[in-house]
Image: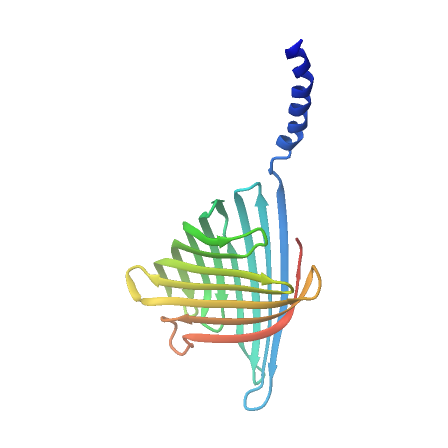
Amino acid sequence: MFFRSLLLPVCLVLWAALPARAQKPDTTLIRYSGQLAGQYSAGGVNRALFSTSHSATLLRGLHFGAPLTGSFLYGKQDGRLREREWVFNATPYYWKGRFRFYGIGGYERSNLRGINNRFQLGLGPGWAFYSDSLGREVAVSNLLIREATYFQGGTERRVSRSSTRLKVVYSYRVFSLNSTTLYQPNLANTADYRATQLTTLALRLSSRFAITGTYTYTFESRVLEGKPTDNTNVTVGVAFSTK
């Protein structure tokens, strides 16, 4: 009788636990964000710059993600086309705790730097020094990438690079900061390197809309003759995102 009296409560506890097990995170989520920004200046140099960037991140369960990002930039100086650039990247990753493992596939085209086509493939580990449920994060990764660049004029170049990335994501009330720093030296010659800094500060107006200010800096030690080695842009715009 004693065991029979325990049978019903035990069955009820097990039955109550079943939904919790069935709700084990195994869902697919898609998060999207898009940004439109621009800059205009007149005086010594008349300059107009327009940029748009978009990202869609597919999250599967607790350990897999696949961000897809793309951006387009168009700029004129004194009425002449100077900047026209496309960049696309896919960076699928696996994470467990603070450990990350990334893959990357990238494409780039830049009128300013004389690049007709650039392709990248790579993979490597990463580590999150800090992360929380609000999406704030400080993380470092290092990937080995193989790069093929086809320049204007018909020349081409293939190199292997180390790609070190520092990513900082922070938010406080209606403000958020997203910063990515890349350092990519040639494995055969460290004097040949590329560095990129992208920082966006956003003031959130609602759960979906924000006003943004973006700072972008790129440096490439080896470029076509007559092309600039670095470029800096500061733009202000609006952003839309989903949760």
Compared to 229, does 90 lie above or below? above
Compared to 43, does 54 lie above or below? above
Q: Residue at x 42, y 51 (%)?
A: 126
Residue toward you, 131 or 47: 131
Horizontally, residue 128 falls left or right of residue 70, namely: left
Most extreme residue toward the left, as rendered? Answer: 188
Quarter holding the N terminus?
top right
Q: Residue at x 48, y 54 (%)?
A: 130
Q: Position of residue 47 (x, y in %)?
A: 57, 82
Compared to 99, does 194 lie above or below? below
Residue toward you, 60 or 120: 60
Most extreme residue toward the bottom, as rendered? Answer: 44
Q: How many marks?
A: 0
Q: Residue at x 41, y 49 (%)?
A: 125
Q: Position of residue 99 (x, y in %)?
A: 44, 47
Residue toward you, 92 or 23: 23
Horizontally, residue 10 falls left or right of residue 157, namely: right
Horizontally, residue 24 falls left or right of residue 8, namely: left
Q: Position of residue 112 (x, y in %)?
A: 48, 73
